[in-house]
Image (cartoon, coloured by chain):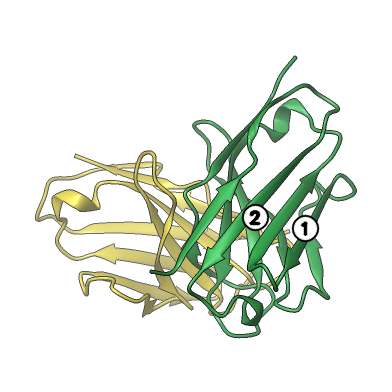
Amino acid sequence: EIVLTQSPATLSLSPGERATLSCRASQSVSTYLAWYQQKPGQAPRLLIYEVSNRATGIPARFSGSGSGTDFTLTISSLEPEDFAVYYCQQRTNWPPITFGGGTKVEI
Amino acid sequence: EVQLLESGGGLVQPGESLRLSCAASSLTFSSFAMNWVRQAPGKGLEWVSAISGSGDSTYYADSVKGRFTISRDNSKNTLYLQMNNLRAEDTAVYYCAKGLQWLVNLDFFDLWGQGTMVAVSS
């Protein structure tokens, strides 16, 4: 099973600042990595798939990069609605599909 | 509007069974794999099971293999999860989630339901 480790666990920032979230895989996942955003009481929402492709309707301030085992989600300028928990997910060595433990972006 | 709507959650005792349903509207249901993903209270996301668009292929996490069965009825645009021999550690919100890409069995998830709570306790 591929383990995804996200860091940091919590990121404390202010609106307008840049957020950089990390996801490291225990073995290569090629480009089969996605990012999700989850707000309290809501289902997750797909942000980025295959490392750097924005899902439908996702603002351009969200971007993804990386390859192999190290990946980054960047939010260029935080909006108030961006404060949430973010998860990475891989689908390479499936099953199982696995998720990272999450990074909480808080004010 | 394309949406997924789960139902069937509730409170059960250890060892009991429950069947979850997920009704899909306004999408070409049979062309996409479907999944169940769960989230224990205050915890992260855990993939549970997937089923191909045709229903011919199924996949399970080790934690539920042999106890849970995923199925679908494409004539009713509905996904199911039969959960037997439930344990306390199965307590979670269960989401159904649609695969992103046409005819890809295990994929990313671009559409999620609102979730249904399953609580296992004596």
Q: How many numbered marks have been drawn onto this rendered protein structure?
A: 2
Q: Which chain is yellow?
A: A
Q: Quadrant of the C terminus of chain A?
A: top left
Q: Residue furthest left?
A: A16
Q: Residues within 10 Å of mark 1 (few under 14, many from 20)?
A: many
Q: Chain of mark 2?
A: B
Q: Residue beneath label 2, please? A: B36
Q: Is residue B83 visible?
A: yes
Identified by mark 2, the residue type is Trp
Mark 1–mark 2 distance (CA, rounded to whole Å): 8 Å
Q: Quadrant of the N terminus of chain A?
A: bottom right
Q: Colour of chain B?
A: green
For the residue pair B117 and A37, the one nearer the viewer reads as B117
Q: Residue at x 65, y 61 (%)?
A: B35
Q: Which mark is residue B70?
A: 1
Q: Residues within 10 Å of mark 2 (few under 14, many from 20)?
A: many
Q: Which mark is residue B88?
A: none
Q: Do residues under tags 1 and 2 come within 8 Å of each other at their CB atoms?
A: yes
Q: Residue at x 18, y 45 (%)?
A: A13
**In the image, residue B83 lies at what x, y percent?**
79, 43
Identified by mark 1, the residue type is Ile
